[in-house]
Image (tube, rainbow, N blue to C red):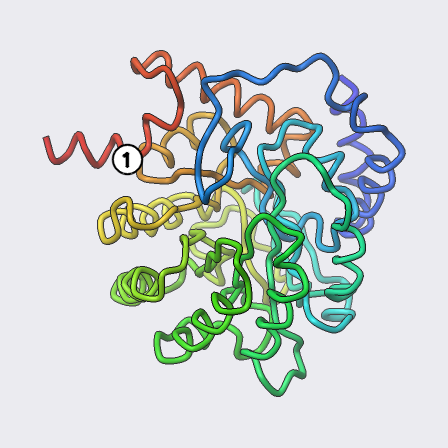
Amino acid sequence: MIWRALKWILFRLDPERAHHLVFVLLRVVPPRVLRGRRRADPALRTEALGLTFANPVGLAAGFDKDGLGYRQLLALGFGFVEVGTVTPEPQPGNPKPRMFRLPADRALVNRLGFNSRGVEAARARLIGRTAGVVGANLGRNKDSASAVDDYVRGARTLGQLADYVTVNVSSPNTPGLRDLQAVEELRPLLEAVKAATDRPVLVKIAPDLADDDVDAVADLAIETGIAGIIATNTTIDRGGLRDAPDVGPGGLSGAPLKARALAVLERLHARAGDRLVLVAAGGIEDADDAWERIRAGATLVQIYTGFVYGGPGTPARISAGLAERARRDGYERVEQGIGAAARAVVL
């Protein structure tokens, strides 16, 4: 009831203003209050990236861009929070308005453009953290002369404080950024970032990549020895929307992304097997979606738009639902279901 009333208020505000208001509310509530009496379910414990996750449900980058509220977000029940995207130097991002709701499609469109307070501000907020898994999502400045230098700086600055780093080369809102997904551009970038930090390195890819390019990125990830791939970022495709206002360019997230994000994940798993940690993102709204991604090969899942529409109870609901589905299917732990759909096809 409280969330229903709060959502009614928030959804009558500009989306970005509502987002800032949520952070104000989160930061005045102590994490122990948000955590309540909820206890960890051992069935949800997941080992990946050399880390132990209390549950496999994470918050995708873009929500807590500057590390302002990750403690409170972890307390809501997320198994991990990915801070960012963080750019080396502060930058304002694109002109407002730059975020839009599509309620009929349970979707968002954003063209934020890596608005960031910069790596030094994020570093200051990550110093001294003691609990939970926190990743750092790294980007480049819009006017940067060298993408490699930008990502290396991010990795060196935040790599000792975050538990893993993600190379974000798939946002559609920074000109030329997606060109870095081409193997000839991506190889030196991943090699440089991997050399700059001792933390696990992941790369986040776009759902709009052609299938052959998805295969090429998977092969490159294995070759360069990075830890894994996040599939996927937002899409520039607008096909099939019921609510399609002319909001201009930007990345679409939420339910319309579900089918393509799943297809990319399945292709990555078919190509890489267990040689990469796959993190599923895009259109995950409930436990059924999350369990489908895990069975398709994801070790971890991330939500964003589903959290915006579903409210603060979403991570706990999805986690509890995952434990239920794992036990229903005969597993003691959720992670035993990783890739089960692919194994069933082989059998």
The quadrant of the image that shows the C terminus is top left
Q: Measured from the top left, where is residue 144 in percent x and y?
A: 65, 83
- Name the residue rendered at 71%, 28% in the picture: 75
Answer left or right for 268 relative to 142. left
Report the residue that reaches farthest toward the right: 28
Answer left or right for 73 relative to 107. right
Crowdedness near tag 1: few (<14), some (14–19) or many (≥20) residues, C-alpha within 10 Å: many
Identify which amino acid the numbered label 1 is placed on.
Answer: Gly
- Name the residue rendered at 61%, 32% in the picture: 78
- Name the residue rendered at 66%, 75% in the picture: 141
Q: Measured from the top left, where is residue 189 in percent x and y?
A: 47, 74
Above/below status of 240 relative to 143? above
- Name the residue rendered at 58%, 84% in the picture: 146
What is the secondary structure assignment of the residue under circle 1? loop
Location of residue 216 (image quadrant): bottom left
Q: Measured from the top left, where is residue 287 in percent x and y?
A: 47, 25
Q: Which residue is mark 1?
A: 339
